Image: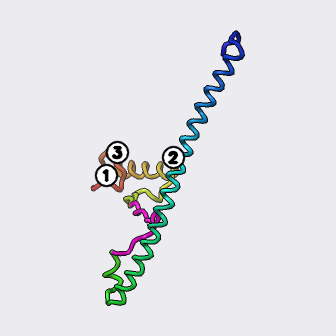
Amino acid sequence: MDITAPASDIEARIRGEAERKIAAVHNLKKIHNEIIEEREAFLTRDSNRRRQLGEALAQAKKAGFSDAELKDWRVDPVGSSKRAKVRRAPSKNRGEGPDNSKAATEAGTTAATASGTADSRPSDQMTA
């Protein structure tokens, strides 16, 4: 800010900035409230539909369908879907810590020297 600017100019700038912030907050509040209301309405409708589906599944079971036959018709509540587990390839050196890495390198060098070839691969990866 300029020290030589009159106080009224400084006050006008501050008011202008405050009014822009207030307008932004009002807009955020309006949109946020709409989202919350729509979600609550959806969850209410979803709950009612799942209850109706449960009743229909019970009637189908009474009519003679097995649980296995009705399995595909069941629906979990919104947000409760389970994520698939990520499969990771097993690590060859899973038990080795940082202290054992030098021992593995030395073992590979010893095996290469004993076989008469200078191969940089660890001994467990050599084929002979």
Question: Residue 51's quadrant in the figure?
Answer: bottom left
Q: Main secondary structure of the magenta part?
A: loop
Asked if the magenta segment contains residue 106, the reply would be: no
The residue where tag 3 is placed is 120
Q: Is residue 48 left or right of residue 117?
A: right
Q: Is residue 83 magenta?
A: yes
Question: Residue drawn 54% across and 51% down?
Answer: 33
Q: Quadrant of residue 10?
A: top right
Kindly state the secondary structure of the residue where label 1 is placed: helix
- Quarter holding the C terminus is bottom left
User: Camera-side residue: 126 or 1?
Assistant: 1
- Can you identify the residue that label 2 sits on? 31
Residue closest to the far left: 128
Where residue 92 appears, x then y in whole percent? 39, 58
Which stretch did the figure color magenta?
A: 73-86
- Expressed as whole percent of the image width and height from the top left, the position of residue 126 reads 31, 54
Name which residue lies at 36% across and 90% down.
62
Residue 112 placement, left or right of 47: left
Q: Position of residue 127 (x, y in %)?
A: 27, 56
Q: CA distance from mark 1 to mark 3?
A: 13 Å
Earlier-in-chain disc, 1 versus 3: 1
The residue that appears at 35% across and 78% down in the rendered structure is 71
Please give the residue where the numbered disc 1 appears in the rendered image.
115
Query: Toward which corner of the image does residue 4 lie, by quadrant?
Result: top right
- Pick whichever, 95 or 21, lies toward us: 21
Separation (CA) of disc 2 from disc 3: 63 Å
How many residues crowd around disc 1 within 10 Å: few (fewer than 14), some, or many (20 or more)?
few
- Name the front one of labels 2 and 3: 2
Q: Amino acid at mark 1?
A: Ser
State whether residue 17 is above or below residue 38: above
